[in-house]
Image (spheres, helix red, strand yellow):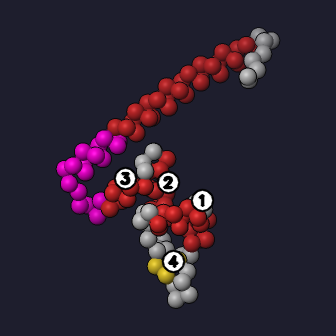
Amino acid sequence: MRIGELATKTGVSVRALRYYEEQQLLASERSPSGQRLYQDSAVDRVQLIRQLYAAGLPSKSIRTLLACESGVATPELLTWFSGERDRIDRQIGGLVRSRERLDGLIATATAAVRAGGACHPS
């Protein structure tokens, strides 16, 4: 598939896909006319790249992680992977606590509105 089709299927801009290639996160072949061509598996790869970026990993770390998809890893790399997973778990915990506090504020504001009071954003 061409780059525009991959962009449409993944919701990622063409510019971002080119950046992923520059960072060696994504590979393409070239048509005789020089257009980028991607395998169907590129859709899943782009989705994984987006998830890893969203989790806060930098390009270099994502490149290292993706290189291990072949099943080759070292004990040091496994330790690093575990550390990244633990960091993500801490982020999730923080987000859950933030959501719980927001739920409490929503409940308080809802009660105030029902009682005839009003809360206004500042």
When the figure is inspected, residue 83 is found, relative to residue 72, above or below; the finding is: above
Residue ID for mark 1: 11
Of callouts 1 and 4, the N-terminal one: 1
Residue under pointer 4? 37
Q: Main secondary structure of the magenta part?
A: helix
In the rendered view, would you say 77 is above or below 32?
above
So how many labels did they put on this image?
Answer: 4
- Residue type at mark 3 is Ser
Please give the residue where the numbered disc 3 appears in the rendered image.
61
- Give the number of the mark in front: 3 or 2: 3
Left or right: residue 122 compared with residue 90:
right
The residue segment tinted magenta is 68-85
- The CA span between labels 3 and 2 is 13 Å
Q: Is 122 left or right of 99, judged from the image as shown?
A: right
Which x, y percent locates residue 45?
A: 45, 62
- Which residue position holds label 2? 50
